[in-house]
Every structure is written in C-alpha cells, then in structure tokens.
Amino acid sequence: MEYTDFENEIIGLIDCKTEGNYWDFKREWHSNNADLLHDIICMANSLANRDGYIIIGVEDKTFTVCGVDQTVNRKNQQNVIDLLRQKPKWAGGYIPEVYVKTIVIYEKELDVIVVKQSDNTPFYLLEDYKNEGGPLFKGAIYIRKGDSNTPKTSTADIYDTEMLWKRRFGLLYNPSQRAKHYLKDCDNWEMVDGDADKEGVNRFFFYYKPDPDYTIHIVDSGIEELEIARKVIDINDNSIGSFSYYLFAFCNVSYHTDYSDTREVRLFYKDIPLFSSYLECIDEGRTQIIPPELPEVDAYYIEDSFRYLIFQFVFSHICRNYSKEAQEMIYRVVPVYYNQREHDEFLEYVKARGYGIHKILGEKIKGEALERLQKIEIGRYEGFNVPTAAKIVTNELNGNSNLVINFARPENVEYGLITERLKRGKMFVDWLKEWRNIEEKVVKE
C-alpha cells in the first residue's frame, strides 16, 4: 500500500517506539472531556514549536497499532472544535487550532488530532473547568515537555512559561523570523518623513514601533529624479507585455496607462538587508505592487513569505485611491498559497490532471486541466473612447467576484498572450479554492 507523506510521518513516529515533545499515543479516545482538553492544551503549548499530534489507536506502552474502529467516545473534528469553543473561556480569546484526520495504517484506522503550531502561546483558561476528569485550573500553564504533560494540579515552571511568552512576542526567532512576525502586525508601523535630499526630494521610511531596529525604505534604485520621469512608459509597451499580465485586470490601466519599475522597497534589520524588490507603479503612482513569484511561468504568492507580507504592507501604507480594487483584481488571477508545502502539493495535484507547468520544457495542457482552462472566460474591454465606461465596468467588477476583464489596449502586440495568462491565473485561483475544499472535506471525514 502506498502511503501519503503524512501517513509516512506517523508511521515513522510509531517506529520510534517512544513518545516525544510533539507526539503522544493513546490506545483509545479519552473517556472524558477534561482529559482531552488537557492533552490539547499541553500540545498547543509544546516547547517543540511545531504542529503536534495526538495519535489515537496506538498502545502507548508497546506501540502496537490497535486501531479505533471499536473505540467508544470517538469524536470527529466538529466534536473537538465544539469542545474548545463552547466550554472553557480562553485567555485573550486565543483557542488552539486543531483538526482530526483519520488515516489507515497497517489496515487499521487511526485518528490523529493535529494541533497546529501557533505563536499565540501560552494557551490557558480564565476559569476552572470542572467537568468529569477535571478540574483544569484557571491561569495554569499546561505544557508538553519531552514525552510528558504538565499534571492538571500543577503548572509549568517559570523558565518554560517565559519561553512561551517570548514566542508570542517574537523574541525566540532570528531577525528574519521576527520581521515576518512584525509585518503581520501592520498597524504598528509608523512613517517618518525625512529631510529633502540634494535633488530636493523628501525621503521617508517606516519603522516598527515596538522594535525600531526594523525599518522599511522606499528608494529610487539609484536613479536621479529627472531620469525617473524618463523611465515612465506606457503599460502597453512591448517591453512589459504578458510578463505583468495581472496588472491588466485592473480597470484604471485602461485610461491611466503610465508604468514604471524604478522604485524599490527594502526591509532592514538595523543595517542588515532582509528583503528587497522593485515596485511596479501604475495608475499615476497611486498603486504600487510587489510582483509575484515566477511571473514568467505561473505567477503566485506564498502567504508566509517576505514578498507577500510586504505586498500587503505596501497596499496598506503606501497605495492610495482605488488601490484596493487593484489588489482585489490581482487576487482573482494570482493564487496565494498558505506556504511552500501547499504550493508544491497543489502543483503535483494539477500536474496529475494534465497541467504542464514548465513552458521551457514544452509541457502541454491536457485532460481535466485543459477542460477547465477552456471554460474560463476573460472579458474584453470595449470602452476606451467612452468617458463613463470605466465607472460602469468597475461597478460590474465589484458586483461580480467571478468577473475578470482584460484592460490592455487592442493594439497591444501581446493582447492575446495577456488574455491567455489571465485565463490560466483565474483557473489556478478557482481550482485552488476547490482543492482546499476537497482537502478540508477529507480531513473532516
């Protein structure tokens, strides 16, 4: 029998014949909710700082795979989520994220409670939980350390508790990891206007208020101001073409056709550069975009990457009128993956269904992928000479989240390629949503 990566990981843990700081074996489901809740809290506060597994259906002394077919008190994902949300009161409203996944190993069904890694530690209760098997005490910090849980009548020592709080505040991570943590806290960045330089241009930057060593600068790529003006070109210029296809999904490029890529955004920790990217400036500079990954093949963003986090930061702090509409249209034609693993798994999924990934290798689309692509429709904008057309079509776009229109000029030599890439991008976005629903359904079952 061929196993998935997740199943192989669980088999590897069973073969260790021991329990560890992020996995725990149970012969059967817990006989009471207090014991289950205690185990989940401990795993959520694991010092391992990664996803934890409560593996049910494995004897915790002999590590024999027994299965859960006849287990009493068996719960599904919704039962566990209801327990977490409806019963105890959680400090700060932070609740461990869990899901229950059923797998078959050695012809036996196992239930695995996956407790997702979180930086919202420590998880603890605001009131005693006194149900059968309790009590669990309010304010007690229950953790998993090594192969053991903190007893219900105790609390973690001060050192381990301090480590959990440091995780919440991003203090356990290296500068790059902390920077990602801070970028998600978008409201705590403040802009500082600089003095005019020798060209008379006011420079500015942003700093993170709780930790000012982190700064974000917008610079002009070493090009003098007069040269920058000369670098502004028409977005329909041959040098842009289908490479930046996603820009043509935004209505405003139909009448504000300026484009430049001479500005850069740079993220620093003290004087150490952590990330930099050029900005695509359109719509008279009101919209500035961090381009996605691999725009020459199949463009995408990774949600936990610097590129995407600063993409969001730029829209939040720098872009002006109508930029939110541009951001919305990009989301319709550029998929955003949770992480690199999801990206890789999804690409394997679509490749198995006929999608050729590499243009350089000449892989062609066929099968289900081709059928999906042929069903995608991209609208053609006909209102270039009609003053009121842009407003009308913008209202249509706002009212129909499935609508995508190519706003490139008809004389654009790559108009057809832009349309084709918009189709592919939209197909990926729609297909990713369906795939996630399938994966979620499998997990729940």
Image (tube, helix red, strand yellow):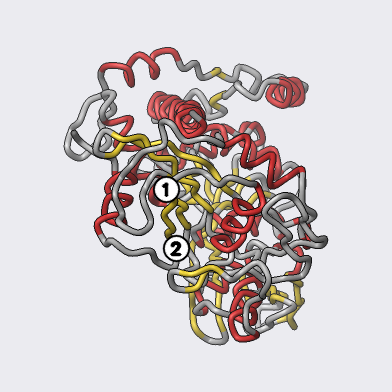
Binning the other alpha carbons within 10 Å of mark 2 as few (below 14), some (14 to 19) or many (20 upward) gives: many
Residue at image point 57% right, 28% down: 407
Earlier in the chain: of badge 2 and badge 1, it is 2
Q: Where is residue 181 shown, x and y percent of the image?
A: 60, 67
SS assignment at label 1 = loop
The answer to whether one can see residue 148 in this image is yes
Q: Where is residue 409 shown, x and y percent of the image?
A: 53, 27
The answer to whether 354 appears left or right of 214 in the picture is left
Residue at image point 71% right, 64% down: 124
The answer to whether 373 appears left or right of 235 in the picture is left
Q: Do the residues under discs 2 and 1 have CB atoms within 8 angstroms?
A: no
> In this orientation, which residue lies closer to the viewer: 223 or 34?
34
Q: Quadrant of the rendered structure where residue 227 is?
A: bottom right
Figure quadrant of the N terminus: top left
- Location of residue 103 with respect to 197 vertically, above or below: above
Q: Quadrant of the rendered structure where residue 439 is?
A: top left
Q: Which residue is mark 2?
A: 22
Q: Which residue is mark 1?
A: 27
> In this orientation, which residue lies closer to the viewer: 252 or 347?
347
- Location of residue 431 with respect to 327 vertically, above or below: above
- Location of residue 294 with respect to 246 vertically, above or below: below
Q: Nearer the viewer, mark 2 or mark 1?
A: 1
How many badges with numbers are in the image? 2
The answer to whether one can see residue 418 in this image is no
